[in-house]
Amino acid sequence: MTTTQPKVIIFTTPTCSFCNTAKRYFREKKIRFKDIDVSRDRRAAMDMQRRTGSTGVPVILINNRPIVGFDKPKINKMLNIK
């Protein structure tokens, strides 16, 4: 029986070290994610701010539930990573 992975979207900018750390962490854990560069996508940046009230990155959506920043304990809990 396979379980489907939650939908993961990460809002990033190319110069954000925490964004790169988060993406590297997802790759290590074999978590598929969609990367949206808010420095290039104004509409996505506005959507991210509307959802979270935050203009800072990374913002990670796991099944549309936002995590502001690279909060590893919260990410692990929401993705059921031990």
Image (cartoon, helix red, strand yellow):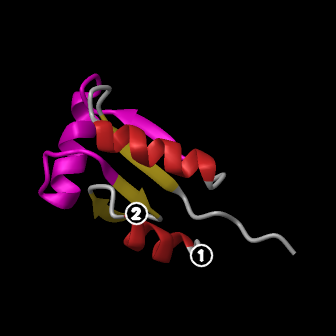
Q: Which residue is mark 1?
A: 82
Magenta residues span 33-59
Asked whether residue 48 is drawn in magenta, I would say yes
Q: Which mark is residue 64?
A: 2
Q: CA distance from mark 2 to mark 1?
A: 21 Å
Instruction: Residue 36: give its label.
Output: none
Image point (50%, 55%), residue name = 8
| Mark 2 vs mark 1: in front | 1
Residue 51 found in image quarter: bottom left
Q: Quadrant of the N terminus?
A: bottom right
Secondary structure of the residue carrying tag 1 is loop
Vertical placement of residue 30 versus 1, above or below: above
Which of the pair 24/11 is nearer the observer? 24
Say whether residue 32 is visible.
Answer: no
Q: Is residue 61 left or right of residue 53?
A: right
Q: Mark 2 or 1 closer to N-term?
A: 2
Most extreme residue toward the right is 1
Q: Residue at left 45%, top 49%?
A: 9
Name the secondary structure under disc 2. Answer: loop
Relative image position of residue 10 (x, y in whole percent): 40, 46
Amino acid residing under circle 2? Asn
Q: Is residue 55 left or right of residue 18?
A: left
